[in-house]
Amino acid sequence: MTAGSQQQDILDWTNASWDRLPAAGLRARAGELAARLAGEIAAGRLPFLATPFMAALEQELAALESGFLKPFEHMLLLGIGGSALGARALQKAFAPGQDLPGHRGKSLWIMDNVDAAVLQAHLDRLPPEKTLVYVVSKSGDTIETIGQYFLVKDWLKAALPGAWKDHLLLNTDEHKGYLREEAGAFGMRTLPVPDNLGGRYSAISAVGLVPAAFLGLDWRGLVRGFQSVAAPLADPGLDAAKLAAHPSFEFAVWGKALMDAGFCELITFFYIPQWASFADWFAQLWAESLGKGGQGSQPIPAVGATDQHSVNQMFLDGPRNKACLFVERAAGPEGLPFPADMPSIFDYLQGKRFGELLPAEALGTRMGLCQSGVPLLALRLGRDDARAAGKMMALLGAATLLTGWLMGINPVDQPAVELGKRLAKARLGAGGLAEEKAALAAFTGQGGAAGRDERRF
């Protein structure tokens, strides 16, 4: 993976433990997967790789950036899961000033949970006249997001009776769903979620790029980086040899071979502190895509150096069922120089800068994991800029998809999650759902069939 003429992004397989993994048969499936990619892309089922929507979206983003988004100081994003995790990762990585003292620029606030107190705090403290509410739901009826939408819409209508709809931007299905009906009824501005673009694969679409444009991030660099890795996979000329040479296929082979060898947990250790939220973004991508039919590996987000002093003890000396994706950068900020009058026991810091600590600790942790027998793939970024982030997101997204195909499962659905959504709606009294309501009654003891074993402590 090449980031430019002067910097390189490197996948270091030195400590991946290939000699312990059953990978040969998986590599032989490159031709099968290349043909499947071609068929799925031709059928329009993999827009996150082919990005057929991007040319139109770039024009729309440029217009939003230079016009509609400019007057707002705050964006309140209503969305959950993939509708929020990509935007949060981009904000934390490239607009960290919001989390630092004295911030006076634009701010992105993300409501991605059912938290009545936090929602109330936002509505009490945000100035409605300076706030844009960005509502993201592909289906248009995600209960957590729509529940917030009802309350926030009332807040805007009360504060801005003549202009409330101008403070709403909806990102939803182009043709159907409740949010699409709302947009039609009130003439609200919208952006479409392309067909077949699932939430966890949607960060490099309007879902994540609108917040990026609002914050003034280099969203074009994100797109260019993403496409540089994804485009070869969408090329009609893709064949077995070209796919085998693509880093996402090698990652997928490694990921499936790890599972086959009993490595059922995958640590994502980010030694770029501001990129820590990318570990959470990847956790959803990997877990929701691959946790099917009793298969998969559990992603474990971690950030250095913080987690050296917490969960790393388990990584180093716990069950030998863990592998690691280790993400670091070639060089970070130098930081302040250490003072000259430190105690003698810290003489080794003389002449050094604070920024030298993190790479030293990264090396120590990486070496410790390898010596403890943890298969480790190191992703070393030449730069930690938007282009590099786009490349990484394409690599991990494509690798997840291909891993799922090697596993023989569908990596773009989430059937178990859908069951939980139906049960929640049944609990709230939604119409129909008789089977779910009966199951709830049995589970909670209301149907008389289930005994309770509850004890005070």
Image: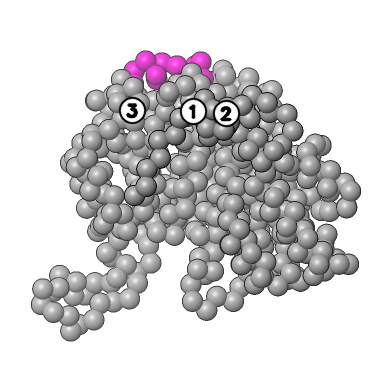
User: Is 28 covered by the magenta stretch?
Assistant: yes
Chain-order first, disc 2 or disc 3: 3
In which quarter of the view is residue 297 placed?
top left
Name the residue nearer the viewer: 106 or 444: 444
Task: Mark 1 and mark 2 in contact? Answer it, CB < 8 Å.
Answer: yes
* 145 left or right, relative to 266: right
Please state the extent of the stretch shown in magenta in the rendering: 23-33
In which quarter of the view is residue 419 placed?
top right
* 372 left or right, relative to 186: left
Up-down relation of residue 186 to residue 40 (above or below): below
Can residue 154 be seen?
Answer: yes
Residue indicated by mark 2: 447
Up-down relation of residue 320 to residue 66 (above or below): above
Cα–Cα gap, marks 1 and 2: 7 Å
Cα–Cα gap, marks 1 and 3: 40 Å
Up-down relation of residue 86 to residue 50 (above or below): below
- Residue furthest out toward the left: 344
- Type of amino acid under label 3: Leu
Chain-order first, disc 1 or disc 3: 3
- Type of amino acid under label 2: Gly
Cα–Cα gap, marks 2 and 3: 44 Å
Residue indicated by mark 3: 258
- Type of amino acid under label 1: Ala
Q: Which mark is residue 450?
A: 1
